[in-house]
Image (tube, grey):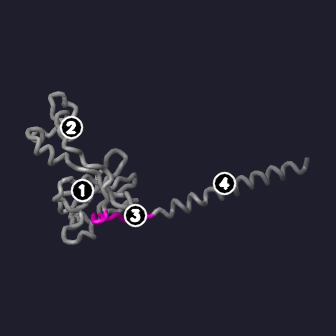
Amino acid sequence: MSGLPSMRNQNAAMKKFLSVLLALPLFWWGGAVRAEIIGCPELKTAVQVGACPSEEDLRYTFKGYCSDDARMYDREEQLCTDFALYRKKKNASLWETPDGRFSGYVSCEPLDPLSTARAVRLAVSKQGSVTRVACGYDTGVTFTHRTKAKCVVVIADCAGQPEACKAECE
């Protein structure tokens, strides 16, 4: 019986040791979190991941979007006055950067070359629990990165130096 208390002490000591040992990686990983700098990507390597809508698809969605029954949409009244205006706005497909971090809708009209697009501004906004890092380009295109991390703008207006558009995320 004299061995029982020492066995209990050994068990208690072992539990403490194991709890400290298990907590070390959490402490180490938590302390190693560093801010990530996110810059606006060059769009010359972006790839199209969504198909352009057909003329028939555009006409069909124009009727649905601009009909009298479309009260559920946040319609732009001017957009529904003319099919040409609607087509110009809605004739777009989804593109993304090769790493998949940034994506954006690009016009399907042949006059929108991404290869020459240069970043001119960066904005950070919150949508619920998601942070939206939006890069605006001189062609009018916006590519967006979404993350759960908290981000702040480092340099917002970078028209003269597109590589300077940066956000810091933790």
Q: x and y percent of residue 131 in the render?
A: 34, 52
**Label located before the other in sequence (2 or 3):** 3
**Residue 36 has which mark?**
3
Q: Amino acid at mark 1?
A: Thr
Residue for point 25% across, 49% down: 52
Q: CA distance from mark 2 to mark 1?
A: 23 Å
Q: x and y percent of residue 44 in the render?
A: 27, 66
Q: Residues within 10 Å of mark 3 (few under 14, many from 20)?
A: few
**Residue 61 has which mark?**
2
Q: Amino acid at mark 4?
A: Ser
Q: Inspect this view and state whether residue 164 appears.
A: yes
Position above or below: 27 against 129 = below
* Mark 4 secondary-structure assignment: helix
| 145 to the left or right of 31 | left
Residue assigned mark 1 = 142
Q: Amino acid at mark 3?
A: Glu
User: Residue 135 sits in which quadrant?
Assistant: bottom left
* Mark 1 secondary-structure assignment: strand
